[in-house]
């Protein structure tokens, strides 16, 4: 985002702040009163994408070509009729959790959507049509309710799509709950990348699949370094997700929280906002800290 703009998706609309001499000023609210489930700016094509989770009308997707002055509704992804959940019920779009874009040349863009109940979709025509990534949906683990399952709900969801800045065909997804998966061929094949993670809520905490990442970020200065804020701690990998190191407690890092930011110039620096635990989800001592 431009340094003079700040866009925040809230439960009551998309709020745009502009920087003024005396601080930040709220200039505009789009989709007032509606829950924003995802926002993304496609810098190369100057496009803004917004997903709305409406209690009555379901999930909606909008596109702006002029930085939020006007919005056009585009098609939301639809699960194929033969797509089944682990309980054999038909898969139906519940929520769009994340939006990412890749532009290989001017005027082109691939849009990636991570959704609930665990499907990854893409569009190559700016949202006119979306396609389910069958290779991920058809993974044997995805159909097993003890490997892909809901975190705080009854369905898994893809909340992070982290793209390697060196190679757009190489990216990771984070699934709550299932874990981290990597593709090196633009989604044709997938590998679980959960070695070293801990799933303390399962009988076997060292399972290959069944983990609950909350946030996943690739370091731009060194894309082999990936940080993860997980339900069971803070983890870091220095070898592209091949092995995760539990750094909970290091430098005061907490074991539980819902936010993570990293320094993209310093591979060893990150910030976390902790909460007390996964039962009492309030700041320790009722004081927000970083």
Image (tube, rainbow, N blue to C red):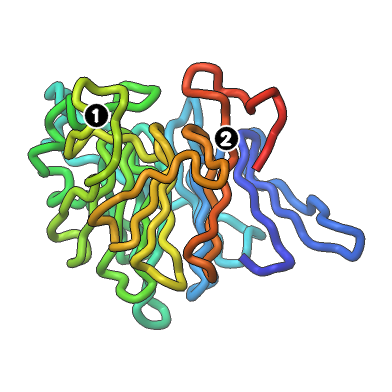
The residue singled out by tag 1 in the image is: 205
Q: Depth check: give the residue in front, 180 or 169.
A: 180
- The spot of residue 45 in percent (x, y) is 49, 73
View extreme (right): residue: 22
* Distance from Cα at disc 2 to Cα at disc 1: 22 Å
View extreme (left): residue: 140
Q: Depth check: give the residue in front, 214 or 4.
A: 214
Q: Is residue 116 visible?
A: no
Q: Is residue 54 left or right of residue 198?
A: right
- The spot of residue 258 in percent (x, y) is 52, 37
Q: Quadrant of the N terminus?
A: bottom right
- The spot of residue 84 in percent (x, y) is 14, 31
Q: Residue sitting at 19 percent across and 48 percent down?
A: 192
Q: Residue sitting at 61 percent across and 34 percent down?
A: 11
Closer to the N terminus: mark 2 or mark 1?
A: 1
Q: Is residue 41 left or right of residue 85?
A: right
Q: Residue sitting at 57 percent across and 55 percent down?
A: 71
Local SS, label 2: strand
Figure check: 227 above or below 96: below
Q: Residues within 10 Å of mark 2 (few under 14, many from 20)?
A: many
Q: Residues within 10 Å of mark 1 (few under 14, many from 20)?
A: some
Q: Residue sitting at 49 percent across and 39 percent down?
A: 249
Q: Is residue 235 left or right of residue 187?
A: right
Q: Is residue 227 visible?
A: yes
Q: Is residue 34 left or right of residue 45?
A: right
The residue singled out by tag 2 in the image is: 274
Figure check: 162 above or below 211: below
- The spot of residue 267 in percent (x, y) is 47, 65
């Amino acid at each position: 985002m431009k340094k003079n703009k700040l866009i925040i998706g809230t439960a009551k609309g998309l709020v745009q702040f502009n920087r003024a001499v005396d601080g930040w000023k709220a200039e505009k609210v789009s989709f007032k009163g509606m829950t924003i489930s995802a926002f993304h700016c496609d810098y190369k094509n100057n496009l803004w994408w917004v997903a709305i989770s409406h209690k009555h009308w379901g999930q909606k997707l909008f596109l702006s070509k002029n930085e939020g002055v006007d919005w056009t509704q585009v098609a939301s992804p639809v699960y194929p009729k033969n797509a089944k959940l682990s309980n054999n019920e038909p898969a139906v779009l519940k929520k769009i959790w994340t939006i990412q874009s890749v532009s290989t040349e001017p005027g082109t863009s691939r849009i990636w959507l991570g959704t609930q109940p665990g499907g990854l979709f893409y569009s190559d025509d700016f949202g006119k049509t979306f396609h389910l990534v069958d290779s991920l949906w058809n993974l044997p683990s995805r159909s097993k309710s003890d490997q892909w399952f809901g975190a705080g709900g009854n369905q898994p969801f893809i909340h992070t799509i982290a793209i390697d800045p060196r190679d757009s065909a190489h990216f990771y997804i984070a699934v709550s709950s299932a874990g981290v998966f990597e593709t090196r061929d633009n989604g044709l094949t997938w590998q679980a990348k959960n070695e070293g993670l801990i799933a303390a809520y399962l009988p076997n905490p060292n399972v290959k699949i069944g983990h609950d990442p909350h946030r996943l970020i690739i370091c731009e200065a060194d894309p082999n370094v990936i940080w993860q804020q997980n339900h069971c701690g803070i983890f870091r990998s220095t070898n592209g997700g091949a092995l995760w190191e539990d750094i909970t407690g290091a430098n005061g890092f907490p074991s539980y929280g819902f936010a993570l930011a990293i320094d993209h110039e310093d591979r060893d620096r990150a910030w976390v906002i902790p909460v007390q635990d996964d039962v009492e989800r309030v700041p320790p001592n009722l004081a927000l800290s970083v």
